[in-house]
Image (tube, rainbow, N blue to C red):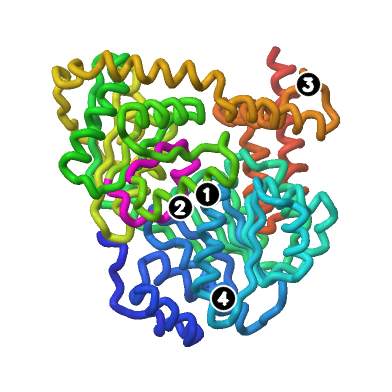
């Protein structure tokens, strides 16, 4: 089904006339399904949980009713929007600025990598809407800005499946404690997870819940294929062959290559440059300025290739991406859904390739079950790959060696030590990033369900203390039973 399927325009929602006019000038004349179903209840003041495929217009589904409600009550610090990445936060910030230009909407962007003193000054001015990432906002609140958030009327948690999966536990606890319990809360996500379901069940009030089509979690306009790589050593050779063939066939097309971590991202990016493929990289090891420049150059179509980690997989709306390549099979199906969702957006077609080695077959099977879609094989001549394999492999190895002396790696270690010292710890004490990695391992083992669930419940204003008491009682009972059995 196409993302746009309703003939009714935005006028049917009784939105402010200037909002409808701005949407029209931007070429947005018909609501997508998530907008059609969620805007009316949000305007009525109901809490909302929306589950919709990536690329279906979720951002406008909460931005438009937020602007409408603010117009009826134009106070400062009216709305707070939380997102997991700086890039997504900046994108939402820009969209609000464009749509709210006729009424001079004041928007504040609170993200890491920017001057914290200047951000504090922006908060003090009383912006109407604040768009933030959890880490920096938590730091600001703990630095004495908690009073600035006690009158927030609307809270939006975008990419809720990731925000409530435990990665932001400590930050969310600080943020939720600073917000008023009486507020309208909206959760938007591409997938329904147990944490989001738990938030719906135990929230302060029963929210309006809307789920998009669940048969296939990726859009139907997307052509998804896998490329079988018999020998993992040839992975880079297959990647180069795919890029070369695709650019030769469609030279004006843009593509995103997803890698598993920052180090691999840098290696692939530098190796491709040496092989003559101009590209930009996007990962969390880069400075904020470098990340912003990469996004700008890619969005402006000056650079056709973006090499990125999952940092670029959520929320970024780059309309002209024609091809997504997974350099390896992502271990989590949800990550695959978000990655391939960077193409075939808003009804447009797109293509996604995943490089598959024999050891990764089970991962692919798990993804296919999750998205209810069977990927077809895309044949690439191994003979042709072998012709370039030596040159490609040498270039990738050189890039890996050079990375050892790359300032981004050194900067990562320096920042890691700074965080430890600022937290009052010793250098040998585990860093906050390492703690998060440990939390991730704990989540994967199934032992942190309680913590994750409580985060989600807090997001919807539920009674966390009661649930924690119940959980403690259940644990005590289970321990007694175990001791008796032993």
Label 4 sits on a secondary structure element that is helix
Please state if 431 lies on the left or on the right of 186 as rendered: right
Mark in front: 3 vs 4:
3
Q: For mark 1, what is the residue?
A: 292
Q: Nearer the viewer, residue 92 or 282?
A: 282
Tell me how far mark 3 sits from mark 4, CA to CA: 47 Å
Q: Nearer the viewer, residue 364 or 478?
A: 364
Precedes in sequence: disc 2 or disc 3: 2
Label 2 sits on a secondary structure element that is helix
Position of residue 192 measured from the top left corner of the image (x, y, whole percent): 47, 49
Q: Is residue 44 above or below residue 473?
A: below
Mark in front: 3 vs 1:
1
Label 4 close to label 2 by CB (< 8 Å): no
Tell me how far mark 4 sits from mark 2, CA to CA: 26 Å
Magenta region: 304-322
Q: For mark 4, what is the residue?
A: 67
- Residue 118 part of the magenta-drawn span: no
């Amino acid at each position: 089904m196409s993302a746009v399927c309703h003939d009714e325009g935005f006028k049917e929602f009784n939105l402010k006339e200037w909002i409808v006019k701005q949407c029209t000038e931007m070429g947005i004349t018909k609501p997508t399904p998530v907008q059609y179903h969620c805007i009316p209840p949000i305007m009525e003041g109901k809490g909302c949980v929306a589950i919709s495929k990536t690329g279906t217009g979720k951002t406008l589904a909460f931005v438009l009713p937020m602007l409408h409600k603010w117009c009826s009550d134009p106070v400062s610090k009216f709305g707070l929007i939380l997102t997991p990445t700086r890039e997504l936060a900046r994108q939402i910030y820009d969209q609000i600025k464009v749509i709210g230009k006729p009424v001079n909407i004041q928007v504040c962007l609170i993200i890491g990598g920017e001057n914290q003193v200047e951000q504090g000054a922006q908060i003090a001015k009383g912006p109407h809407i604040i768009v933030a990432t959890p880490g920096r906002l938590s730091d600001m609140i703990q630095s004495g800005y908690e009073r600035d958030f006690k009158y927030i009327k609307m809270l939006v948690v975008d990419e809720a499946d990731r925000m409530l999966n435990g990665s932001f536990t400590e930050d969310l606890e600080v943020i939720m404690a600073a917000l008023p319990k009486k507020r309208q809360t909206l959760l938007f996500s591409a997938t329904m997870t147990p944490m989001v379901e738990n938030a719906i069940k135990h929230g302060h009030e029963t929210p309006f819940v809307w789920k998009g089509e669940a048969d296939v979690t990726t859009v139907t306009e997307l052509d998804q294929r896998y490329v079988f790589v018999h020998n993992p050593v040839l992975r880079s050779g297959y990647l180069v062959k795919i890029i070369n063939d695709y650019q030769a066939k469609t030279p004006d097309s843009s593509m995103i290559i997803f890698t598993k971590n920052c180090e691999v991202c840098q290696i692939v990016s530098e190796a491709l440059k040496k092989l003559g493929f101009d590209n930009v990289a996007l990962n969390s090891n880069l400075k904020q300025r470098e990340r912003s420049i990469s996004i700008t150059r890619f969005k402006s179509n000056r650079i056709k290739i973006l090499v990125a980690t999952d940092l670029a997989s959520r929320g970024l709306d780059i309309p002209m991406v024609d091809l997504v390549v997974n350099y390896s099979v992502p271990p989590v199906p949800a990550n695959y859904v978000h990655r391939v969702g960077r193409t075939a957006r808003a009804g447009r077609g797109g293509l996604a390739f995943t490089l598959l080695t024999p050891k990764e077959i089970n991962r692919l099977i798990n993804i296919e079950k999750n998205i209810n879609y069977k990927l077809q094989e895309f044949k690439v001549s191994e003979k042709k790959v072998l012709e370039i394999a030596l040159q490609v492999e040498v270039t990738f190895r050189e890039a890996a060696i050079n990375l050892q002396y790359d300032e981004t790696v050194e900067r990562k270690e320096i920042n890691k030590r700074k965080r430890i010292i600022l937290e009052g710890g010793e250098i040998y004490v585990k860093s906050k990033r390492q703690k998060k990695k440990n939390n991730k391992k704990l989540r994967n083992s199934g032992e942190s369900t309680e913590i994750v669930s409580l985060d989600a419940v807090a997001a919807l204003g539920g009674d966390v203390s009661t649930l924690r008491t119940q959980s403690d009682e259940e644990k005590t009972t289970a321990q007694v039973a175990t001791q008796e059995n032993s």
